[in-house]
Image (cartoon, grey):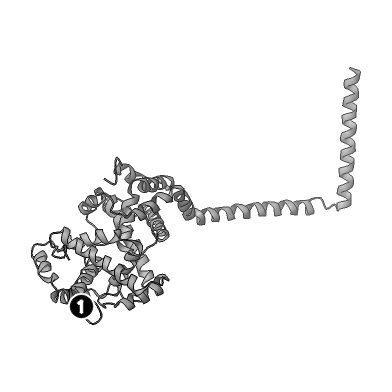
Amino acid sequence: MANTNVDLETIDIYLIGDEEEIAEGIRLIDAHFKEKIVEIIRKRALSATPDDLFDIYQEVLLGIYKNAQEGKYDPGTKTKTLMAFIYKIASNKAIDWLRRKYAQKRKRDTDQDVLIDSVAEIIKDSSVYESWQNAHQNEERAIILETIRNLVPRLKHRQRQVAEIIVENFPKLLSLLDIKKQLLERYGEDVTTVAVKSTRQEVYNKVKEALSITGYGEYADD
Amino acid sequence: MTETNDNISKDEKALEALLAAAFRLDFPKELSDEQAEKFFQQPAQLSKEDKEAINSWGTDFIDKLIEGQKTTSDKHQQDITVNEELVQESFAMNRDKNGDGLDEETHRKIDEERKKALEEEENKDNNQNNES
């Protein structure tokens, strides 16, 4: 458990106190929730380097500090519980980072309908379709997607970069050369086409693994 | 899997679609209290590389981070203090120049006389002590 022995009520009290008390609350949050906060960040910011993670993490703590300082954290009235409060701030800070990184590429929040149609259309033509339909009927689609979100961030750094490029460019499907070009443009990394192909395959394997784990793994023996 | 001209099979496209769906369509920015509690109770799912990075951060940065946040107000306060000191010094300088209306040479002579008087007083005290 991430928050072993932490007294959430104590942190709550610190966060509604004066500046010194809020600072103490931040120290306790760092001591007890650091890994979970980084997990939230990592799931959004796939290509973040360790330095990027540290920067975003500090922004999260500062965000909590500022919100508390401005009286915006008030458990039980204005805001949700501490954990929901932390999740929201961490998620938003990671999205901000991603937006800054891909600012010129697409309008992230305005293309949801197009995305939904594209995902449905592409899956319809594949052997994933039947599994996906079954999952939908059994309301387990969300579990598959959550599993993908849990597995992909644990890939190696280069593989996460490729995953992020695929995600951020969707519904446009990129060729190996496109991915190779973006690796160079975005991350300054000149990778051979062969290496890009094997890296992309590792990303595919993680998605297949998620399908397999959740019981939709006809790809398990590919 | 059947390869298409751009080397991405239909099934691979579907995997990419699932990947995009996972990270762009069905990814809540907020959780309910119950969902958040459940999430935080699970062990963190991080790579070894990320865990190593986290361990290297230490805790010293927090005070610096918070101090940085306070810099503006502290600096503002510091500026006010410095300005007040400057004003006081300025007042004192003005008093020196305008209070007695004497020039530097006169001040020097007064200081010399003061020193002589003090030395004479000290000598007297010493003589009296020796006699007693």
Along the line of sight, the residue nearer the viewer: B58 or B124: B58
Please, is residue B27 above or below residue A110 in the view? above
Res A44 → quadrant: bottom left
Q: Residue furthest bottom?
A: B5
Res. A16 visible in picture:
no
Res. A111 visible in picture:
yes
Q: List x then y, in percent, for residue A125.
A: 14, 77
Along the line of sight, the residue nearer the viewer: A9 or A105: A105
**Residue A25 in the figure: left or right of residue A5:** right
Q: List x then y, in percent, for residue A50.
A: 40, 58
Amino acid type, callout 1: Glu
**Residue A192 in the figure: left or right of residue B88:** left
Q: List x then y, in percent, for residue A27.
A: 39, 46
Res A14 → quadrant: top left
**Residue A194 in the figure: left or right of residue B97:** left
How many numbered dots are placed on residues in this image? 1
Q: List x then y, in percent, for residue A115.
A: 22, 74
Please, is residue A173 above or below residue A59 in the view? below
**Residue A24 in the figure: left or right of residue B120:** left
Please, is residue B3 above or below residue B37 in the view? below
The residue carrying mark 1 is B3
Residue at horizontal 29%, vertical 56%?
A: A87
Please state the chain letter of the residue tagged with numbered disc 1 in the rendered image: B
Along the line of sight, the residue nearer the viewer: A171 or B121: A171
How busy is the neighbourhood of tag 1: few (under 14 within 10 Å), some, or many (20 plus)?
few
